[in-house]
Image (tube, rainbow, N blue to C red):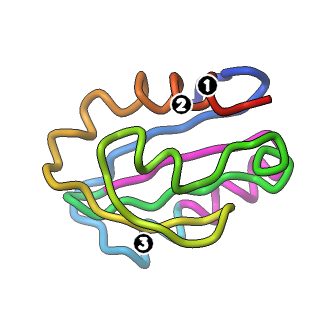
Amino acid sequence: NVLVVKDVNLLAAEVSNANADTLRSLADKFRERYSRNGAAVIASGTTVISVVTEDVVKRGLRAGDLIAAIGGRGGGRPNLAQGSLPDPALMKDAMGKVAKAVEEKLK
């Protein structure tokens, strides 16, 4: 389910039994579909990947901000970050937390 928050198409999704390469591939597909105004957090178990389109990065939101918003740790480039969650149960409330982060960070 993709929500729209401040004109940004936002996805927070949990994928069963996926490795980091699969999550990255899903993140790339999201960016192909939403080449502008897009942000996503995709996780499996404790691994999490976040992507933010360049126009959204320019508005003040970085991929790592979304991982931090759901209680994860990680890093990478402003438009793509990989991290981990201390507990996969944190993904349950991810959409609300990610939407709140988008609202707070975007200019």
Image: magenta residue range:
27-43
- Is 37 placed above or below 7 here? below
Relative side of 76 to 9, left or right: left
Q: Residue at x 42, y 72 (%)?
A: 22
Which residue was labeled with disc 1?
104
Q: Are marks 1 and 2 in contact (CB under 8 Å)?
A: yes
What residue does disc 3 label? 22
Q: Are marks 2 and 3 in contact (CB under 8 Å)?
A: no
How far apart are the alpha carbons under marks 2 and 3?
A: 25 Å
User: Within 10 Å of the Cα at label 2, are there few (<14), some (14-19), or many (20+) other Cα atoms?
Assistant: some
Residue 83: where, in percent of width, then height? 37, 65
Q: Secondary structure at mark 2?
A: helix
Look at the image and say whether residue 39 sits in the magenta stretch.
yes
Instruction: Looking at the picture, tell me which residue is in the foreground, 88 or 67.
Output: 67
Secondary structure under tag 1 reads: helix
Residue bearing the label numbered 2: 101
Report the amino acid beneath label 1: Glu
Residue at 34% in and 59% down: 73
Amino acid type at mark 3? Thr
Rounded to the nearest angstrom, the CA distance separating label 1 from label 2 is 5 Å
